Amino acid sequence: MYTFLTYSVSLFVIVISVFITLFVKYELEQMFREKKDVVPFHICNVVITLMVSCGAHAVMTIYIIGNEFNLILQLVILMFIIIPIYISGHFAFEKYKSVYRKYINADNGKVIVLNEKYLKKKKLPSKLKNYNAISKEK
């Protein structure tokens, strides 16, 4: 029972950590104007996720449950949990990025096509169209 609780908390922490690290990786790639994925970012993301999940697992094992913590064994087990979640999260994030991309640009930097799905996603609800109409008239 305690093992299931410990790994459930670790899984929850892994999923949150993978989402956050993939988002930060995407923002860093935009900041450095990288066109393709950068492998060191992926390695850093997996290491960061491993550290966070190992810390959560250690706290749950030692302080909450009161059992002994075997570091090497837990690192191997957590890596086998992290890798499939990270890979599937990466592919899901790449699909989301490609579907809701604002525009497609050419090699010379000019905008070729505005994405229809991005424009539909950013549409305001009809209730909010005239929300601030009085201040716009002034």
Image (cartoon, rainbow, N blue to C red):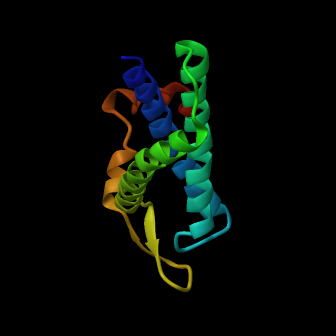
Choose top left, top right, bottom left or bottom right for residue 66.
top right
Q: Is residue 103 left or right of residue 52?
A: left
What residue sits 60% from the left and 38% below the top?
71
The answer, for residue 20, to whether it is visible in the render is no
Residue 83 visible in the snapshot = yes
Q: x%, y% of residue 68? A: 57, 24
Q: Residue at x 59, y 60 (%)?
A: 43
* The one of 46 and 137 positioned closer to us in this rendering: 46
Instruction: Give 138 or 11, whichever is nearer the viewer.
Output: 11
Answer above or below: position of 13 versus 59. Answer: below
The percent position of residue 22, horizontal first and vertical second, equals 52, 51
Q: Is residue 80 above or below residue 71?
A: below
Marker count (numbered): 0
Q: Nearer the viewer, residue 110 or 133?
A: 110
From the top left corner, tell me how far across and down residue 61 is, in percent. 54, 22
Taking the spot 37% from the left edge, 43% from the top edge, the residue there is 123
Going by the image, does 118 lie left or right of 136? left
